[in-house]
Image (spheres, helix red, strand yellow):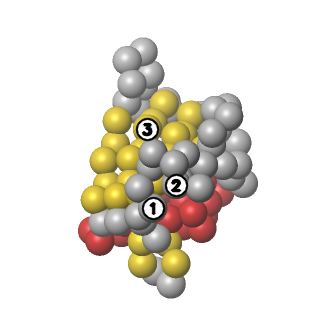
Amino acid sequence: MDAYAAQTGFPGLEIFTHEDQAGIASDAAGLRFEGPITRPLAGEFERLLLADGKPIYKRLMLELNSEGGEFEAVKRVAGVLKKVGSMSALSTRVMDGKVCA
């Protein structure tokens, strides 16, 4: 885990905010997820990214390294990200040597 990332309640999920790294804008966050997508991940995304159904951050970068997971969990995570992305700038990336399946 990166020394500059805040801990989350989900294994393999890190969040980076202005509180962790001064170079990140106060209205932005970075998420890094590595591992299988399972049921509790959508709830953790909701907790970290939404307040009263609205995005907490205006800009969000999500870095993925996952070979997939439980179908229903993937659908729930996609729904949360769609909601966030409909109201804020959401970018995703998969780094060289990583996977998003």
Above or below, 6 relative to 2: below
What's the amino acid at mark 2?
A: His
Residue at x 46% of width, y 54% of height: 29
Q: What residue would you read off at disc 2?
A: 18
Q: Which mark is residue 26?
A: 1
Q: Nearer the viewer, residue 84 or 22?
A: 22
Q: Secondary structure at mark 2?
A: loop
Above or below, 88 relative to 66: below
Q: Secondary structure at mark 1?
A: loop
Q: Secondary structure at mark 3?
A: strand
Q: Nearer the viewer, residue 3 or 83?
A: 3
- Dot 1: few (<14), some (14–19), or many (≥20) neighbours within 10 Å? some
- Dot 3: few (<14), some (14–19), or many (≥20) neighbours within 10 Å? many
Residue at x 56% of width, y 34% of height: 34
Identify the image quadrant of the N terminus: top right
The Cα atoms of the two marked residues, 1 and 2, are separated by 5 Å
Q: Are marks 1 and 3 in contact (CB under 8 Å)?
A: no
Q: Are marks 1 and 2 in contact (CB under 8 Å)?
A: yes
Q: What residue would you read off at disc 3?
A: 63
The Cα atoms of the two marked residues, 2 and 3, are separated by 17 Å
Q: Nearer the viewer, residue 40 or 93?
A: 93
The residue lying furthest to the front in this view is 22
Image position, residue 63 (x, y; %): 43, 38
N-terminal label among 1 and 2: 2
What's the amino acid at mark 3?
A: Glu
Residue 80 makes an appearance in the image: no
